[in-house]
Image (cartoon, helix red, strand yellow):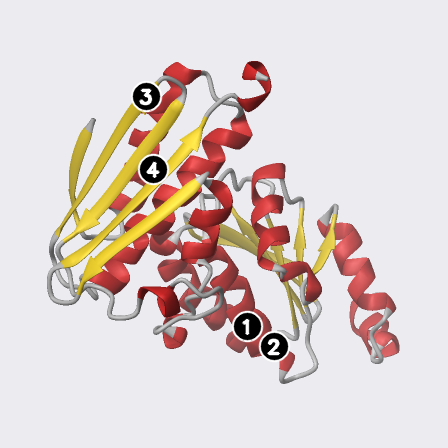
Amino acid sequence: METQVENKLVHYELHGNCLVIYVTDDLDHHTVLQLREYSDRLIDAGNMKHVIFDFTDVGFMDSSGIGLIMGRYKKVMFLGGRAAVTNVGEVVNRIFTLSGLYKIIEQYDTVEEALEGMQKSRKEKNNYYEINH
Amino acid sequence: MKLIIESVSENESFARTVVAAYITRLDPTLEELADVKTAVSEAVTNSIIHGYNGKSGEIEITCEIQEREVIVRVTDTGIGITDIKKAMEPLYTTKPEWERSGMGFAFMEAFMDSLEVTSEPGKGTSVLMRKHIGKEQDS
């Protein structure tokens, strides 16, 4: 596992082929503009298959956040990847629910559960264990 | 309350925070506060992205309180909307390449009690939103 801090809006972790992005600011058009490219670079550089967005520190999100998550999902989807959101607070949860995002994106209480959930139903489960355990 | 801001994305959080601070006198719930903040954020973002299309311009935000109703108006003098009905359709966006979700007006409608959009192509757009604060206490 690798942890780095490079961007004041997020920090991230790499767990095998899972990228975990911890968002640490409100998500609106302004912050999303900065996060789009940053997340894509992380996905490309690490050849990441799955993306998890953690919302522990997000107090506000508008429809721009939906675009950010859907955009990253579309990116990894073509490689059979999945996207998940974790630690979603009440305010952000209403936005996700209203937008219908949960029909496409998985929701977990914690990052650990998301990582576990993504392993469980993965076809390459065995490979993942060889690499990471 | 009247606030005039430049059409730059940095001002989105400023605009919604000012409106939120202004309405705290009504003692809104956290949910009501989030609703108004989201609606203001959507309206201001629309003006920046669509109204001015990244160019510089001014956005006027007025907010007044009548008894327990919050009345917010967000006005720009940008390009305007040709087909308001189409623009308000959920998931419709003219900027899919910018990953706009097309949920802006839908969120304004969902989170506020009423939404009126007036626009003239070439002149600008004005969004009027109303929301009653404190439903539970009054009933």
| Residue A119 place in picture, x, y as percent | 82, 67
Q: CA distance from mark 2 to mark 3?
A: 49 Å
Residue A77 position (above or below residue B132)? below
Labelled pair 2, 1 in contact (Cβ < 8 Å): yes
Q: CA distance from mark 4 to mark 3?
A: 19 Å
Using the image, tell me which numbered label, if any, was put on residue B16. Answer: 4
| Residue A132 place in picture, x, y as percent | 79, 67
Q: Quadrant of residue B17?
A: top left
Q: Secondary structure at mark 3?
A: strand
Mark 2 highlights which residue?
A76
Amino acid at pointer 1? Ile
Q: Residue under mark 4: which chain is it in?
A: B
Are callouts 2 and 3 both on one chain?
Answer: no
Are there few (<14), some (14-19), or many (20+) residues within 10 Å of tag 1? many
Task: Name the residue nearer the viewer: A9 or A85.
Answer: A85
Pair 4/1: label in front: 4
Q: Is residue B7 left or right of residue B33?
A: left
Mark 3 highlights which residue?
B66
| Residue B64 place in picture, x, y as percent | 27, 26
Mark 1 highlights which residue?
A43
Q: Secondary structure at mark 1?
A: helix
Labelled pair 3, 1 in contact (Cβ < 8 Å): no
Amino acid at pointer 4? Arg
Q: How many marks?
A: 4
Q: Residue under mark 3: which chain is it in?
A: B
Are callouts 4 and 3 both on one chain?
Answer: yes
- Say which quadrant the N terminus of chain B sits in: top left
